[in-house]
Amino acid sequence: MGKTREIKKRIKAVANIRRITKTMQMIATSKFARAQQAATASKPYTQTLFDLVSELAAGLGEVTHPLLDGGQAKASSKDLTLVLTSDRGLCGPYNGSVLRTAMQMFRSTPAAKGGLVEVAGKKGAGFFKFAGINVTKNHALGDKPKYEAVQAIAEELITRFRAGEIGVVRVVYMKYISAGKQTPTVMQLLPFQPPKKEGKTSGGSVFEFSPDAATLLGELLPAAVKALLFQAVNDAVVSEHVARMVAMKSATDNAGKMGKRLTRSYNRARQAQITTELTEIISGAAALN
């Protein structure tokens, strides 16, 4: 009797867990749809702005800009690494992948390891505290990041970079490629690095700037940095929701399978108990006769 009672309690507990994970899966699916729309909607603007600034930077000639050549870098300038993680868990390997990528980058880049570390998300802050790495600032962005909040972070980074307080800014985040693929990525935000074009000859494109190139870059480069950081934050958020959706679906499926196994075990135990009781009754009746 005790065994069947115990199995019945476990069946009830597994059913409760399955209801919770199923609800969390539905919530994550809803949030994923909204976050995916925001991330994909901002990508064309970010990519177009990045391409435009890259073309301008490639055709500058003698014109320079602080966000391209390192600003007023000093000997005391430190690298800054911004790591984007989640505030909540139950999202599978999402945080682990981002944090492993950050630690690998620290091991391979001594300047980053000895520099400043800023974090967005409680999970990253907890990890670095456990690892003994000092976090200078923890940004609270949530799972519905506003452009104004990201813009404020980007403006602060640009100001500190121009002043020479920091020499390089890197962002470690989960890049969203598709619903089935997300990749932990290290992106250099500052100084801005336009892609190098191989095989370009001196007879390439000729640009006319109106207004002049320096004025255009003064407007476009900060906008490009803000757009890239906002896109990274959006990618991180949608990747988190995908990871949680997949993790909760897997947990729901596993709970369903376990519930079926426990039900079979309960039925077998109950059948064995009934058989034992019948045997005892028949044996008692035979003894009386």
Image (cartoon, grey):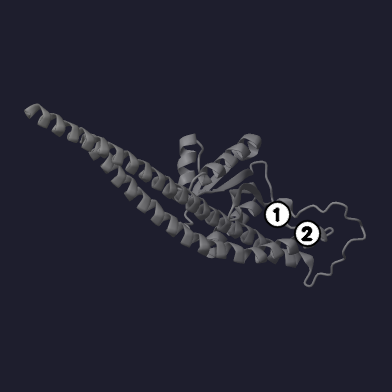
The C terminus - image quarter: top left
* Residue 144 at x, y percent in the picture: 48, 61
* Res. 156 visible in picture: no
Q: Nearer the viewer, residue 94 or 271?
A: 271
What SS does tag 1 mark? loop
* Residue 104 at x, y percent in the picture: 61, 37
* Residue 94 at x, y percent in the picture: 52, 46
**Residue at far top of view:** 287
**Rendered image: mark on residue 57:** 2
Marked residue nearer the N-terminal end (2 or 1): 2
Residue at numbered disc 1? 192
Q: Residue at x 58, y 41 (%)?
A: 102
* Label 2 CA crowd tier, 10 Å (few <14, some 14–19, many 20+): many
Instruction: Give me the C-alpha separation between circle 2 and circle 1.
Output: 10 Å
Q: Nearer the viewer, residue 254 or 45?
A: 254
The N terminus - image quarter: top left
Mark 2 vs 1: CB contact within 8 A: yes
Q: Judge from the rendering whether residue 115 lies leftward or rightward of residue 9; answer left or right.
A: right
What SS does tag 2 mark? helix
* Residue 62 at x, y percent in the picture: 83, 58
**Mark 2: which amino acid?**
Ala
Q: Residue at x 58, y 38 (%)?
A: 103
**Residue at far left of view:** 288
**Residue at far front of view:** 289
Q: Nearer the viewer, residue 237 or 283?
A: 283
Q: Judge from the rendering whether residue 153 lies leftward or rightward of residue 215; answer left or right.
A: left
**Mark 1: which amino acid?**
Phe
Q: Judge from the rendering whether residue 166 lies leftward or rightward of residue 286; answer left or right.
A: right
Question: Quadrant location of residue 111?
Answer: top right
* Res. 137 visible in picture: yes
